[in-house]
Image: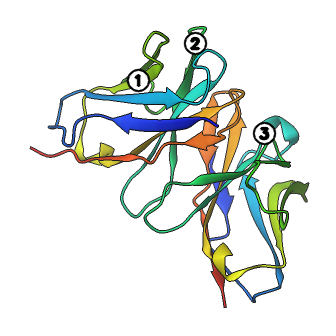
């Protein structure tokens, strides 16, 4: 089965910008993989931030954006807030179904 | 806005079949794609599969032989059955909804299902 890889952890300063990426073991990620991005805080269910590469949910803050970057799916946070400290997961779809990345722990410090 | 609530047993014995139900409110059971996702304690997320009211479904190949999903429009519910449970299936199980088979927009709160004798 395809492996989807994310950075295990990243640290960013408040007000800074950080980009999380999501790579596929079988080649470049494209819009046909319909990248989804989710945020999960401890003890809570995940919540959707981005679907279909760059579509925002009604509750997604403007500082979050999705894109394709260098053959990977990317989630960029601009003007990071302390409340953005969380685990972030990507989900890619392939011909046989969906595969989650292992998650990125984002620390705001 | 779609709201989802999982329900099911608090505990499953090894070799038994897990049956979970997700009750939908605030949205039509007929138009969304209904997804199940699980998360073992302290670990990442695993996509189990989805079902649509039309009967179309798509399951994770690693679970396909043990999984079935269905939609009950009369009750505004959809369900997951996972057979031959083992301790490796211990996880929080989430139901979710998307407007296509390639999106997850809404999540339930999740229900922890331990597998133990």
The structure residue drawn at horizontal position 81% and vertical position 60%, both measured from the top left corner, is A74
Density class for disc 1 (Cα within 10 Å; few <14, some 14-19, many ≥20) is many
Q: Say the numbered circle drawn on residue B53.
A: 2
Instruction: Describe residue B111's horizontal placement relative to residue A10 as left or right.
Output: left
Q: Locate residue A43, reporting x and y percent.
A: 43, 64
Q: Nearer the viewer, residue B103 or A30?
A: B103
**Gap between marks 2 and 3 measured at Cα:** 22 Å
The structure residue drawn at horizontal position 62% and vertical position 49%, both measured from the top left corner, is A3
* Snapshot quadrant of residue A19: bottom right
The structure residue drawn at horizontal position 59% and vertical position 12%, both measured from the top left corner, is B56
- Going from the N terminus, do you reach mark 1 or mark 2 first? 2
Residue furthest to the left: B117
Q: Are marks 1 and 3 on the same chain?
A: no
Camera-nearest label, 1 or 3: 1
Q: Locate residue B12, reporting x and y percent.
A: 19, 38
Task: From the image, tell me which residue sits under label 3.
Answer: A34
């Amino acid at each position: 089965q395809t492996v989807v890889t994310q950075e295990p952890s990243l640290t960013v300063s408040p007000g800074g910008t950080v980009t999380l990426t999501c790579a596929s073991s079988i080649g470049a990620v494209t819009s046909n993989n319909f990248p989804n991005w989710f945020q999960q805080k401890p003890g809570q269910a995940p919540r959707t931030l981005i679907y279909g590469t760059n579509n925002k949910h009604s509750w997604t803050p403007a500082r979050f954006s999705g894109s394709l970057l260098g053959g990977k799916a990317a989630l960029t946070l601009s003007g990071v807030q302390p409340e953005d400290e969380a685990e972030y997961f990507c989900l890619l779809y392939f011909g046989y179904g969906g595969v989650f990345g292992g998650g990125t722990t984002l620390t705001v410090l | 806005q779609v709201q989802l609530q999982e329900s099911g047993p608090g505990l499953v014995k090894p070799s038994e079949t897990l049956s979970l139900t997700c009750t939908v409110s605030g949205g039509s059971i007929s138009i969304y794609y209904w997804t199940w996702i699980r998360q073992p304690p302290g670990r990442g997320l695993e996509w189990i599969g989805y079902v649509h009211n039309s009967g179309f479904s798509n399951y994770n190949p690693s679970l396909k032989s043990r999984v079935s999903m269905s939609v009950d429009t009369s009750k505004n519910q959809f369900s997951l059955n996972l057979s031959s449970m083992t301790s490796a299936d211990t996880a929080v199980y989430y139901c979710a909804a998307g407007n296509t088979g390639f999106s997850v927009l809404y999540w339930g709160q999740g229900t922890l299902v331990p597998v133990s004798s």
